[in-house]
Image (cartoon, rainbow, N blue to C red):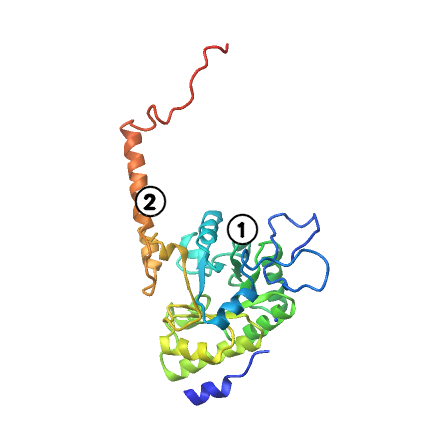
Amino acid sequence: MAAILRRFSKPYTTLPTSNPKIPNYLRRMSNMPEDTVYGGPKPQNPDERVTLTTLRKKHRKGEAITMVTAYDYPSAVHLDTAGIDIALVGDSASMVVHGHDTTLPITLEEMLMHCRAVARGAKRPLLVGDLAFGTYESSSQQAVDTAVRVLKEGGMDAIKLEGGAPSRISAAKHIVEAGIAVMGHVGLTPQAISVLGGFRPQGRNVLSAVKVVETALALQEAGCFSVVLECVPAPVAAAATSVLQIPTIGIGAGPFCSGQVLVYHDLLGMMQHPHHAKVTPKFCKQFAQIGEGINKALSDYKQEVENRSFPGVTYSPYKINPARG
């Protein structure tokens, strides 16, 4: 295994606008070069915005990178306030927002709606938008066209695509060559559950483990700035992280990745609904029990309305002004 990894460990060789016609939800792209050689916007303050340069610096220093999904304005504001490095507008919205059992049904138009809402709320994190299933598989040109829309219409800084088949590697390369930052995704790739036979961990035998690492290296060679490793054994993630020169972001992949990502609803414990309970993965730690608080608040509201204790005098602030006819 070590010999195989050494054989593949090669060094990897990276839009704001003043046009008033561009919709005003577009913010300054965080992958804009910080040492610009042309006129226009001033270099961004790294203390205010997370850029690809920020992530590279953190990676070199061995500092952990934080990534959380966001799907709307409120969740984006929460990530922004918490100082999360990367906000991922994930196609997991299909499951946790739209109520589907998989990520496959969500459309590009729906993803763009989520992207725009997140872009309005998150001013500090790097914004990454998933390419929805069916919007980039046909050809590299289709992939580039979709990626362009995610940046121009969705206000994202970068895109993420799943898989490591030659066509996906080619798509990643063409998107990067089009000037768009790309995050790869290997291991369990939810868009491929049809061929994986369900949501199954990957890399659990030698051949599968080698494939995970080789795919991650191929995505690095294609120009990806980072790779998500999902549902693979910790030693496999550690091997990939050690041979890659770009950050790895783990989800169900153990503690040895360069950073971690979780789904917003999962980590907050918003899973009391049967559907959320069904789709919540084993590897997710619940850092809060927000769902229980929501249920209690709604129950309390219902009870107070029914017994007519709400709104009451306290929440009936408007009075008749006798001076007015």
Marks 2 and 1: CB-CB under 8 Å?
A: no
Q: Position of residue 113 (x, y in %)?
A: 53, 51
Task: Tell which circle, 2 or 1, labels the residue nearer the N-terminal end.
Answer: 1
Identify the secondary structure beneath mark 2: helix
Q: Residue at x 31, y 64 (%)?
A: 282
Q: Position of residue 288 (x, y in %)?
A: 32, 53
Alpha-carbon neighbours of circle 2 within 10 Å: few (<14), some, or many (≥20)?
few
In the rendered structure, the answer to whether residue 205 lies left or right of residue 128 reads left
Determine which quarter of the picture holds residue 251: bottom left
Vertical arrangement, residue 4 with respect to residue 288, above or below: below
Which quarter of the rendered picture does the N terminus lie within?
A: bottom left
Please state which of residues 222 and 256 is positioned toward the viewer in this rendering: 256
Q: Position of residue 33 (x, y in %)?
A: 64, 64
* Residue at numbered disc 1: 113
Identify the secondary structure beneath mark 1: helix
Q: Position of residue 85 (x, y in %)?
A: 48, 60
In the rendered structure, the answer to whether residue 244 lies left or right of residue 200 reads right
What amino acid is labelled 1 in the image? Met
What amino acid is labelled 2 in the image? Ile
Residue 212 visible to the viewer? no
Determine which quarter of the picture holds residue 140: bottom right
What residue occupies the far right of the structure in this picture?
A: 39
Foreground tag (2 vs 1):
2
> Where residue 294 is drawn, which disc sits there?
2
Alpha-carbon neighbours of circle 1 within 10 Å: few (<14), some, or many (≥20)?
some
Vertical arrangement, residue 80 with respect to residue 320, above or below: below
Residue 258 visible to the viewer? yes
Please state which of residues 252 and 204 is positioned toward the viewer in this rendering: 252
Vertical arrangement, residue 99 with respect to residue 13, above or below: above
In the rendered structure, the answer to whether residue 95 lies left or right of residue 155 reads left
Q: Residue at x 70, y 51 (%)?
A: 18
